Amino acid sequence: AYSLTLMAIYFMQVQMRLPVLDVSLFKGECTAPPEAKPKHNVELACTRFGLLFSFFSFFSQDFRWGMEVVSVRVGERLSATNEAYEQLRGRLDQRLHIEDPFLLGRNLHCV
């Protein structure tokens, strides 16, 4: 569930301009920090089913498996060889890469 949640957030960041938030703002409290509260409405141009279809379409057709990293910390499409992912273990393997935004060396491709 954690990996799929990160994939959904990443999809919305790169396809729908969902803002990237600094993970250090989150302290494990039950409420979101003020910086995480939306300053404007993010319009969803799709119905729920359209959004779901777009999610699967993105990861099945556009996303470059084994070459890109799902990273909500970065929130943009970059190669796994990019220096932003230096700490990510297994980033050169030809498989799905999902960066844990709190433990930068942890690649969630193994779960």
Image (tube, rainbow, N blue to C red):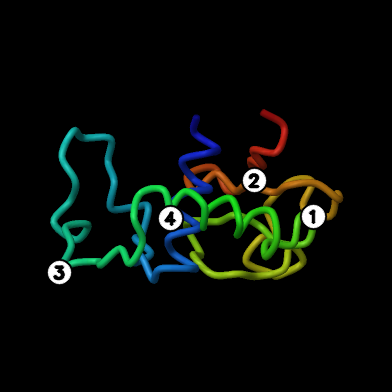
Q: Are dots 2 and 1 in contact, CB under 8 Å?
A: no
Query: Is residue 102 placed above or below 74 in the rendered structure?
Result: above
Neighbour tally class for label 2: few under 14, some 14-19, many 20 plus, Cα within 10 Å = some
**Where in the figure is residue 23, as x and y percent of width and height?**
37, 52
Q: Distance between the residues labelled 4 and 1?
A: 26 Å
**Other residues around mark 3 within 10 Å, as few (<14) / some (14–19) / many (≥20):** few
Residue 32 shown left or right of residue 16 in the figure: left
Label 2 sits on a secondary structure element that is: loop
State the separation of the CA atoms marked 1 and 3. Answer: 35 Å
Q: Which of marks 1 and 3 is nearer the N terminus?
A: 3
Q: Mark 1 — residue? A: 66
Earlier in the chain: of badge 3 and badge 2, it is: 3
List the residue tagged with mark 4: 50
Give the Cα separation between the discs numbered 2 and 1. 16 Å
Residue 39, disc: 3
- C-alpha distance separating marks 4 and 3: 25 Å
Judge depth for marks 2 and 1 and give the one in front. Answer: 1
Q: Are marks 1 and 3 in contact (CB under 8 Å)?
A: no
Q: Earlier in the sequence, mark 2 or mark 1?
A: 1
Who's the residue at 16% across and 70% down the image? Answer: 40
Question: Label 1: few (<14), some or many (≥20) within 10 Å?
Answer: some
Nearer to me, 29 or 17: 17
- Mark 2 sits on what residue? 105
Image quarter of residue 83: bottom right
**In this rendering, which labeled residue sits more in front, label 4 or label 3?**
4
